[in-house]
Image (cartoon, helix red, strand yellow):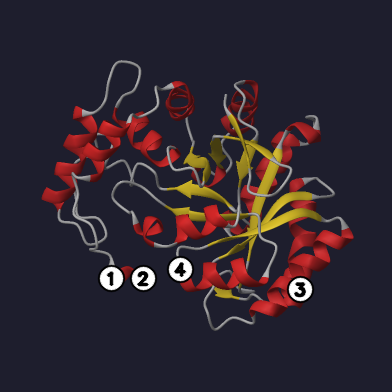
Amino acid sequence: MKYNQLGKSALQVSEIAFGCMSLTKGAADNIRLIHAAMAAGINLFDTADLYDHGDNERMLGEALKDTRREEVIIATKVGNQWRADKSGWDWNPRKDYIIAAVEESLRRLHTDYIDLYQLHGGTIEDPVSETIEAFETLVQQGKIRYYGISSIRPEVIRAYVQQSNIVSVMMQYSLLDRRPEEAALPLLLEHNIGVLARGTVAKGLLAGKEPASYLNFSADQVAAAAAAVARESVPGRGPAETAIRYVLQQPAVSSAVLGIRTDKHLQDALAADKAPALDEKTIAALSASIPANVYEQYR
């Protein structure tokens, strides 16, 4: 397994991260699957207090509580507050909520610190300085080691780059969603802030799934991109691995966060780590397979 430094932090993260959101609630195999991932070299596990009303964090905590804590990097998220009746959630980036919410995450995760605490969204109307103050307080208290954000919005990312000590930004990024290339990736690379990329195979559309519309692309355009991925695949690097390597070739990207729910998902994720890197010709061919500048309505 290859490891990359996450931005300006001291964290060395596996270039393939385990996205826990895909795990089935209550599945007996979850702990075994997490332990198998650790044995294969995956050390970054990403969850959120939003997932399964906190049960996803609880499950990850159960899986990791008897392991050597220093060998894993736990990343979770905050900012979406469940309503009392569990009918939905509301956005809450206020300091008092974040300070209270971390205590519940620590309890569910069976740990006394979180390696990476991420704001789970964000808008430019948020009280950014107050949110940053909350994260800085938690760092000073030793309850979190580092903090970051999960956002695709350039104006939100820019605000945190300019005003905070974030070490990472999680964002959707794939051949079918190249919005990060327009501004975010260059900005984050310049400021040594690591990118955690999710959605790298675009809901499976780049890995053999039946073509369908995606963002502003038609099903035919998606099919053309998937065909290019298939053409540029080689022995030892199938379509899914090629799509993932397309993302990992970006110098700003520290890790691809992949949803893993089954043994096959895990093996496919590990195959991406071992797959040959893309050369410049392959990258150019993939980039040319899909129109650029079609994302306006999604900004």
Horizontal and vertical percent for residue 116? 69, 51
Mark 4 or 3, nearer chain start: 3
Mark 4 or 1, nearer chain start: 4
Q: Residue furthest top?
A: 235
Horizontal and vertical percent for residue 241? 37, 29
**With 199 as the anchor, is 49 left or right in this view?**
right
Mark 4, residue position:
153
What kind of residue is marked 4? Arg
Mark 4 or 2, nearer chain start: 4
User: What secondary structure is marked by label 1?
Assistant: helix
Can I make out residue 120 in this image? Answer: yes
- In contact (CB < 8 Å): disc 4 and disc 2: yes
- Tell me the CA gap for discs 4 and 3: 21 Å
**With 174 as the anchor, is 154 left or right in this view?**
right
- In contact (CB < 8 Å): disc 4 and disc 1: no
- In contact (CB < 8 Å): disc 1 and disc 2: yes
Query: Is 280 in front, or is 256?
Result: 280
Q: Which mark is residue 296?
A: 1
Mark 3, residue position:
133
Mark 2, residue position:
299
